């Protein structure tokens, strides 16, 4: 399976597209991105997605500020080059991520999230 999700680096920041799985556990909706091991949660699907969006923005900002984004992506199985990187294939993520393997016991929606983050001065 070919994965179309990516990260693109520029001198000003990054643009990223990642897989997002949204499911309900009890009364809580969880929006989970296995390729970054980030999640957001809340009582509605929309609020869980908004929480994830905040977490993704915070993650990218911190990683860019600290100069650690490429290394962290590599730890999560991304293939990262100088200008672009690719999200790991779902089959690869299943082998690395127990939480994702447990996801198959839930009814879920899979979607993609796109985000741009500028390097702050």
Image (cartoon, helix red, strand yellow):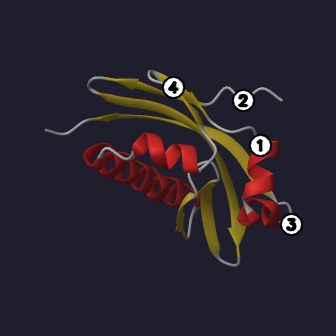
Look at the numbered disc 2 and give the secondary structure of its residue: loop
Label 3 CA crowd tier, 10 Å (few <14, some 14–19, many 20+): few
The residue that appears at 79% across and 53% down in the rendered structure is 94
- Tell me how far mark 1 sits from mark 4, CA to CA: 20 Å
Label 1 CA crowd tier, 10 Å (few <14, some 14–19, many 20+): some
Where is the C terminus found, in terms of image quarters?
Answer: top left
Report the label total. Answer: 4
State if disc 3 and disc 2 touch (CB < 8 Å).
Answer: no
* Residue designated by label 2: 3
- Tell me how far mark 3 sits from mark 4, CA to CA: 35 Å
Q: Position of residue 115 (x, y in %)?
A: 44, 35
- Among numbered discs 4 and 2, the one appearing first in the sequence: 2
* Residue designated by label 4: 81
- Among numbered discs 2 and 1, the one appearing first in the sequence: 2
- Among numbered discs 1 and 4, the one appearing first in the sequence: 4
Q: Nearer the viewer, mark 3 or mark 4?
A: 4
Look at the numbered disc 3 and give the secondary structure of its residue: loop
Q: Position of residue 116 (x, y in %)?
A: 38, 32
* Residue designated by label 1: 90
Q: Nearer the viewer, mark 2 or mark 3?
A: 2
Label 4 CA crowd tier, 10 Å (few <14, some 14–19, many 20+): few
Q: Which mark is residue 105?
A: 3
- Residue found at the very far left of the displayed protein: 121
Q: Position of residue 75 (x, y in %)?
A: 56, 50
């Amino acid at each position: 399976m070919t994965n179309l999700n990516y990260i693109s680096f520029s001198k000003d920041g990054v643009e990223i597209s990642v897989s997002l799985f949204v499911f309900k556990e009890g009364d809580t909706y969880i929006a989970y991105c296995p390729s970054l091991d980030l999640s957001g949660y809340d009582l509605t699907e929309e609020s869980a997605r908004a929480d994830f969006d905040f977490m993704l923005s915070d993650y990218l900002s911190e990683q860019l500020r600290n100069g650690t984004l490429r290394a962290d992506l590599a730890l999560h199985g991304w293939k990262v080059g100088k200008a672009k990187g690719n999200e790991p294939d779902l089959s690869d993520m299943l082998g690395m991520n127990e939480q994702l393997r447990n996801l198959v016991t839930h009814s879920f929606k899979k979607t993609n999230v796109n985000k741009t983050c500028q390097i702050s001065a």
